[in-house]
Image: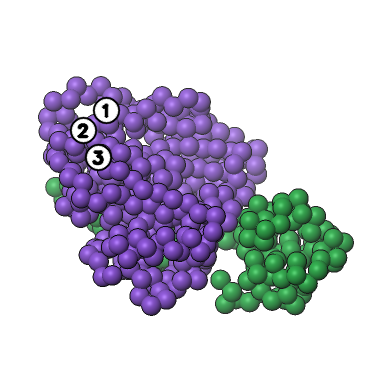
Amino acid sequence: MKKDEVPQDPGALGKITKELCYATDSSGKYVAEQSTGWEVKSKALDVAWQDIQKRIAAAKQKVLKGEASPLLFFMEYRLMDTGILAGYTGFWQWQVKRHLKPGAFNTLSPKQLQKYADAFNVKVDDLKTMTVNEDGV
Amino acid sequence: MKMEFEHHQGAHCESGVTTNLLRKSSGGKITEPMAFGIGAGLFFAYIPFIKINNGPAIAFRTMPGDIFNRTCKSLGIPVFRKKFSSKEHAEKYLVDRLNDGTPVGCQVGVYYLPYFPREYRFHFNAHNIVVFEKVGDNFLVSDPIMETTTVLSNYELERVRFAKGALAPKGHIYYPAKNVDITDETIKKAIKSGIKKNVYNMLYIPGSFAGVAGIKRTGNKIKGWRDKLGLEKAGSYLAQMVRMQEEIGTGGGGFRYIYAAFLQEADAYLPGNQLRQISVTFTKAGDMWREAAVHAAGIYKGRLGSQDDFNKMGDYLLEIAEVEKNAFKTLKNIKWQ
């Protein structure tokens, strides 16, 4: 890539910082050049987030239909899998999997619910109503 | 304690941290491309059975930690590293080092990293930063991705140092020994050993998932993605590949440009070995990866989608595999002058 071909498209990162690319100058020598972003990859990032939004919406439907506990919704919302959630809560993975079922979720003690609320950065009340706090992260 | 630490922006977090930590002892000679090359950073791996964000794991660089370790080892610099089960011990150890005047590298997760834009926050736990000073309850941080230094509160730093999930950092802290003399002779030896290791990783690593064989295998697999996964999922997989290839931390072209820059700089230490010429081939490989990314974008944007388009996508990777195979064979056959 030549220095004057380093893309300068708007990107999500561009708001915070420019990123460094390596490119060749007119004599063929490598120099570090800043870039604000590249349309091809910001579109790739969009695709990733669209997929996540779809999974969140599907999880919400499952919870509303009583097929899963609200934990599934928050797991998708926080991009977690059972391994990550087990790590943040201190539960075993098999316990997390069990708590994903509405029946088991409804028997959780306040203390256990608090662990999940902390992991998702929400209040216990919001946990049950699937309310998300946008300032959370 | 106020210490001399210079923050320089890098393209990639680990080679950037390595460069920033070694700047003083190397007198600035270990630039980011040098750290990346000596650390044998270039790689390719496609591991379909490990899922990252519900897509296949694709890597264009070596395992996290390898670049810092190899660079220091090749330059004869002892490395100190520690992981913790207790957050209190982790903090105390960090503060003690800072009080000694030692800037330290920390492995962190990016999901809760407050200065990152939300769009970039995934549960990726192998990011690297330097912590170089404590001011009140805050820590001054040099993140190579950022143009300037940043500040993290005690709580924020603890949260990212103890992020959970795959590759959980467990407070991982590392730093090179001070006052080690890095001579040009050492650098020459380190360059040769870095190239040798990278030749092995790309040409001879066992199995068909990694190295040049991995690129070829992925190219062939992609041709079947349309039928096997459906257009939408195939598009998501390609988007994942482009992100791993081009996103922050790669320097563009799946790290191929950083590697080309390394060979150019290495040429100054070891002239007469055609390194400058071979560097041009890696620039070409980087350009080809980017061309492939543009084609992939056509697919995930919905502009392209026929079987012919997927065949062409796969062919891009097969061509790249050929170019990189020849480039590494040329590196392998160097009779060092």
Mark 1 surroundings within 10 Å by alpha-carbon count, few (fewer than 14), some (14 through 19), many (20 or more): some
Q: Which mark is residue B65?
A: none
Co-location on one chain, circles 1 and 3: yes
Mark 2 surroundings within 10 Å by alpha-carbon count, few (fewer than 14), some (14 through 19), many (20 or more): some
| Horizontal side, residue B51 vs residue A41: left or right | right
Sequence-wise, the earlier of marks 1 and 3 is 3
Sequence-wise, the earlier of marks 1 and 2 is 2
Q: What amino acid is found at the position of numbered circle 3 in the picture?
A: Leu
Q: Nearer the viewer, mark 1 or mark 2?
A: 2
Residue drawn at x 35%, y 57% as measured from the top left: B104
| Horizontal side, residue A8 vs residue B118: left or right | left
Quadrant of the rendered structure where residue A52 is?
bottom right
Q: What amino acid is found at the position of numbered circle 2 in the picture?
A: Lys
Tell me if residue A97 comes above or below residue B37 in the rendering.
Answer: below
Q: Nearer the viewer, mark 3 or mark 2?
A: 3
Task: Report which residue position mark 1 lands on.
Answer: B331
Task: Report which residue position mark 2 lands on.
Answer: B189
Task: Identify the element where label 3 is drawn.
Answer: loop
Tint of chain B: purple
* Chain with colour green in the figure: A
Residue B219 in view, yes or no: no
Q: Are marks 3 and 2 in contact (CB under 8 Å)?
A: no
Q: Position of residue B240 (x, y in %)?
A: 52, 49
Q: Position of residue A117 (x, y in %)?
A: 69, 70
Q: Position of residue B330 (x, y in %)?
A: 27, 25
